[in-house]
Each structure stands twice: as structure tokens, then as C-alpha cells.
Image: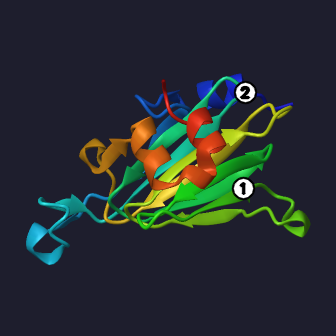
Amino acid sequence: MITAERIIKLYNMKLLPEEGGYFTETYRSSELIDSSSLHQRYGKDKVHSTAIFYLLTPDTQSYMHRVNTDEIFHFYLGDPVQMVQLFPEGSGKVLFLGQDLQVGQYVQVVVPAGVWQGAYLLEGGNFALMGTTVAPGFDFSDHELAERQTLLDLCPSHRDMILRLTPE
């Protein structure tokens, strides 16, 4: 039986700084897009795209954060994950990533650029192996970890999720 520990070892995964969970980059394009061809929010040349494996375990979570590029999540195997997305105008939605399409789980979810996101493994789960694809490619300067009070002010209707997915 596959375990989280086996996946971490197999893919040489590391803890994702600040955000949480385990990751390994599986693809980074060798080609660059000139900054003059990109939206000004990037401010520099970027690779065409990047991809990672991302793993959640019962003792990890993806703390609320945002990136400045659309991020596509792919669910590969394991147990369901609950994700919250908080939009700049103050609305939010909760989604479930997993393989049970009949109960409304998604095997692919898009998080639009600039949308706050966080996720955790549902209680009783052992692990969830997912992947993300980002284009133009991700680098850590694209990432912003949320401050709890900022999100509580933005979207008080998702208070419980915000409290769970932001460090104190």
C-alpha cells in the first residue's frame, strides 16, 4: 500500500516553506517570456510554465496564500481535500478535490490569479497527492502568505476556515 512517507521519499519531496505541505518541482520550462510581453504585475522575465507535485498529510495544511498567476490543481490520488478560495471583492467558495465526482469532488480546480487559497486533508484521511501547473512559471517572489486579520476583514463569512488556515 502506498503511504505519504513512501511518496515523500519517492519524489524527494520537501516541506513547502511558510505555506505547508510537501512539494517537489517536476517541471520548469527552459524558455523565457520577456517581461515586456507579460502583465506588469510580474516585473521580470518568467519561464513559460512550471509544475509541482504537492502532498498534504493529516499534520500539514496549505495555509492561506495567493500567487499572482492562475494556478491549476490536479488531484492524483489519496483522500479528499477541502479548499477555500477568497476573492478580492469579499466573496468566497469552498471546493473539494478528490476522485468521487458523483458527490461533487473535483479532479481539477483553477485558482485565479490574486485569489486567496488554502486547503487541508479531510479528517480521517491519510494523504492527498496533487499537482499544480502555473503559467507563466512560478517563483517564490510570486507568493504571498495571508495575514489572518486581513482575511477576516475581507471575508468574515468564512471565519472558521480562515482561523484554521492562517497561523496565529
What is the distance, in whole Å, between disc 1 and disc 2 at their CAs?
15 Å
> On screen, 116 above or below 91?
above
Res. 3 mark: none
Q: Which residue does the image show at 69% across and 59% down from the upper left?
A: 95
**x then y, percent, for residue 67:** 37, 54
- Three-letter code, disc 2: Pro
> On screen, 39 above or below 138?
below
Which residue is more in the foreground, 117 or 135?
A: 117
Instruction: Bin the neighbour count of mark 2 within 10 Å (Cα to Cα): few under 14, some 14-19, many 20 and up.
Output: some
Q: Which residue does the image show at 65% across and 41% down from the upper left?
A: 160
Q: Is residue 39 left or right of residue 27?
A: left
| Displayed quadrant of residue 10 | top right
- Three-letter code, disc 1: Leu
Q: Which residue does the image show at 43% across and 67% down from the upper left?
A: 89
Check disc 2 and report the residue beneath it: 58
| Displayed quadrant of residue 136 | bottom left
**Which type of secondary structure does the marked residue at label 2 adopt?**
loop
Q: Is residue 105 left or right of residue 91?
A: right
Which residue is more in the foreground, 149 or 2?
A: 149
Check disc 1 and report the residue beneath it: 97
